[in-house]
Amino acid sequence: MPRSERSPLLLAGLLAAAGVAHFAAPRQFDATIPRALPGAPRTWTHASGVAELALAAGVALPRTRRVAALATAAFFVGVFPANVKMAVDWRHRPTPLKAAAFGRLPLQVPLVLWARSVARTGEGRS
């Protein structure tokens, strides 16, 4: 399988794993939900898990890949405030945890670029 065909499936796998994790271990995600959002954090945790699973399915299917990958890029931008909250909340934790939390911040950029790249390879391109 050529690299260009593997990349969307790897992105779909990452999204699916993250989506499942939102249900398997929701408490860690609840803590990252910004307080400014209305409702219970668990609702947002489950909603983002469902979104990741839906995006995974869309990216995996060639017919919906372009739109789903663009939505994935937007999703990665949209969850950035949760990563910022995590970094701020974890700033006094032991160094390895603090490093992981702060390391997530610049990681959003390659994730967004990866999703946009997958969108360019999807069906339905103009």
Image (cartoon, grey):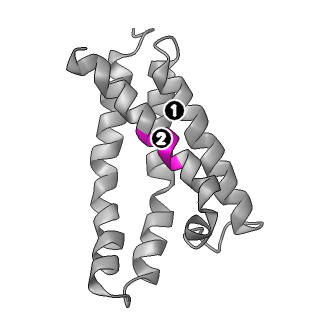
- Stretch of the chain drawn in magenta: 14-18
Residue 114 placement (x, y as % from top left): 30, 36
Q: Residues within 10 Å of mark 2 (few under 14, many from 20)?
A: many
Is residue 17 shown in magenta? Answer: yes
Residue 65 placement (x, y as % from top left): 46, 20
Q: Is residue 45 above or below residue 6?
A: below
* Of 6 and 65, the residue lying toward us: 6
Asked if marks 2 and 1 touch (Cβ < 8 Å), the reply is yes
Q: Which mark is residue 56?
A: 1
Looking at the rendered structure, the kind of residue marked 1 is Ala
Identify the element where label 1 is drawn. Answer: helix
Residue 74 placement (x, y as % from top left): 48, 41
Question: Dividing the image into 4 quarters, which one contains the C terminus?
Answer: top left
Task: Measure the C-alpha gap from mark 2 to mark 1.
Answer: 5 Å
Question: Residue 3 vs residue 21: left or right?
Answer: left
Q: Residues within 10 Å of mark 1 (few under 14, many from 20)?
A: many
Q: Residue at x 37, y 91 (%)?
A: 92
Q: Residue at x 59, y 62 (%)?
A: 25
Q: Which residue is mark 2?
A: 15
